[in-house]
Image (cartoon, helix red, strand yellow):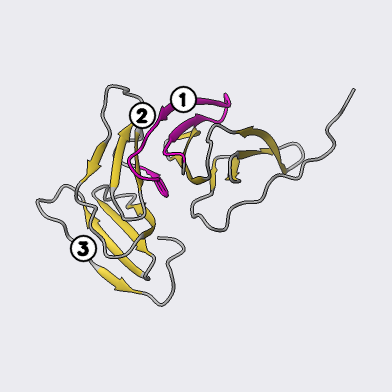
Amino acid sequence: MVKQVGLLPAGCQPWNNDVIATSGDRFVYCATLAIYVYQLDKRFREFKLVSIMSEHKKTITAIAFNPSNKDILVSCSADHKVIVWDCAQQKVVALLENTRDVPIGIGWCFHGSESITFTSRRGQFFRWHYLNPATKLMTVKEVTGFSSDVFIFRWHQKNTSKIALGHRNGTISICHIGKSRKTFSYFNVKAKPLCV
């Protein structure tokens, strides 16, 4: 009988952002085609690999845990797919195929834990309600038309109508969702924003 004595997992990607996420007693990271899930073993006080989830056919570009459900994780990929995973059951919960552009960033809307937003490099934002298959993919019209590629984005945790975006040219945009017109504030920073 063959017994596994060790594992050297594939390396994490330095060329994409948001390829590591944490929730409760878990942390996950993604290699090119797989998501590695580690969970804290309280008895030994160390993290152990509990599952490797793979469904994407091209490079995984971002992952994010649901802020209100520690078992639910979302991933997006260069294969134009967004996948919602249940880490506890190690299975796919929902799948969105054929996104218009390659999604490079993904996040959960704080005003609806079943809503996911993702963006392409040019900053076109889409919103998807993954629990309702009849819901169509919606474009977030207030967040579009940037002169520089989007590098990373974060929703405001308390004011759910605000979103901050970091751009490749070192600027940061603040957008207000739901206004009759777009409102942008640009800040110059000397280096590319690694986090917002």
Q: Amino acid at mark 2?
A: Tyr
Where residue 137 appears, as percent x and y from the top left, is: 28, 34
Magenta stretch: includes residue 174: no
Marks 2 and 1 close (CB-CB < 8 Å): yes
Taking the spot 57% from the left edge, 58% from the top edge, the residue there is 14
Residue ID for mark 3: 184
Q: Quadrant of residue 116?
A: top left
When the figure is inspected, residue 174 is found, relative to residue 137, above or below; the finding is: below
Residue position marked by numbered label 2 in the rendering: 130
- Residue drawn at the location 20% of the way across and 49% of the way down: 177
The outermost residue toward the bottom is: 190
Cα distance between the residues tagged 1 and 3: 35 Å
Query: Which span of residues is magenta-colored?
Result: 79-108
Give the Cα separation between the discs numbered 2 and 3: 29 Å
Query: Which mark sits nearer the N-terminus, 1 or 3?
Result: 1
> Residue drawn at (23%, 67%), measured in percent from left and top?
185
Image x and y of residue 169, in percent: 36, 70
Q: Tag 3 or tag 2, which sits nearer the N-term?
A: 2
Left or right side of 88 for 188: left
Q: Mark 1 highlights which residue?
A: 93
Query: Which of the numbered marks, if any, corresponds to residue 187?
Result: none
For the image, the number of numbered tags is 3
Query: In the image shown, does 88 or 157 lie closer to the viewer?
Result: 88
Within-10-Å neighbours for mark 3: few <14, some 14–19, many 20+: some
Q: Dot 2, how many residues are within 10 Å of its Cα: few (below 14), some (14-19), or many (20+)?
A: many
* Outermost residue toward the left in this view: 180
Report the amino acid beneath label 1: Val
